Amino acid sequence: MDFYGIGELICQYQVTYCGRICIGGRKINLCRALAGQHVGVREVADKIWLVSFMEYDLGFFDEDESRVEPAANPFIPRLLPMSPV
């Protein structure tokens, strides 16, 4: 399976039915809505991995903490500043 628009991926994992990926014997909780889907994982810093689905960055996995912290929400509407009257 190829991931387009994500960049160079180190690994890809399939999300289990309970919403987890297993990395090196660790069970990392992601989201049950992604069950059966493949996610891409690439190292962005020492022991920090970016978890992506399609072209969306889901979060950052920290090996020391063994958890995923969410990335910025790409769906938040951007409001333009109001002009003074």
Image (cartoon, rainbow, N blue to C red):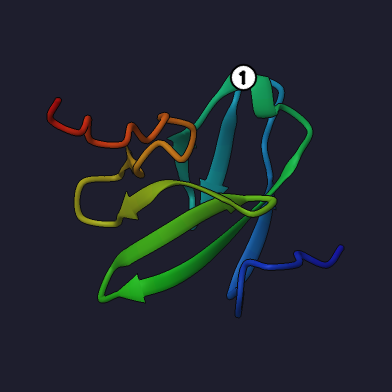
Quadrant location of the C terminus? top left
In which quadrant of the rendered view does residue 18 lie? top right
Query: 83 above or below 13?
Result: above
Q: Position of residue 76 (x, y in %)?
A: 41, 30
Residue 44 seen in the current view: yes
> Which residue in the structure is indicated by mark 1?
32
Q: Position of residue 48 (x, y in %)?
A: 30, 64
Q: 84 or 59: which is nearer to us?
A: 84
Q: Position of residue 41 (x, y in %)?
A: 54, 61
- The residue drawn where x is 43% and y is 59% is 50
Q: Secondary structure at mark 1?
A: helix
Quadrant location of the N terminus? bottom right
Q: 83 or 74: which is nearer to us?
A: 83
Q: Position of residue 59 (x, y in %)?
A: 40, 46
In this view, the residue farthest toward the bottom is: 8
Q: Amino acid at mark 1?
A: Arg
- Crowding around mark 1 (Cα neighbors within 10 Å: few <14, some 14 to 19, many 20+) is some
- The residue drawn where x is 42% and y is 29% is 77
- The residue drawn where x is 57% and y is 41% is 21
Q: 50 or 62: which is nearer to us?
A: 50
In this view, the residue farthest toward the left is: 84
In this view, the residue farthest toward the front is: 85
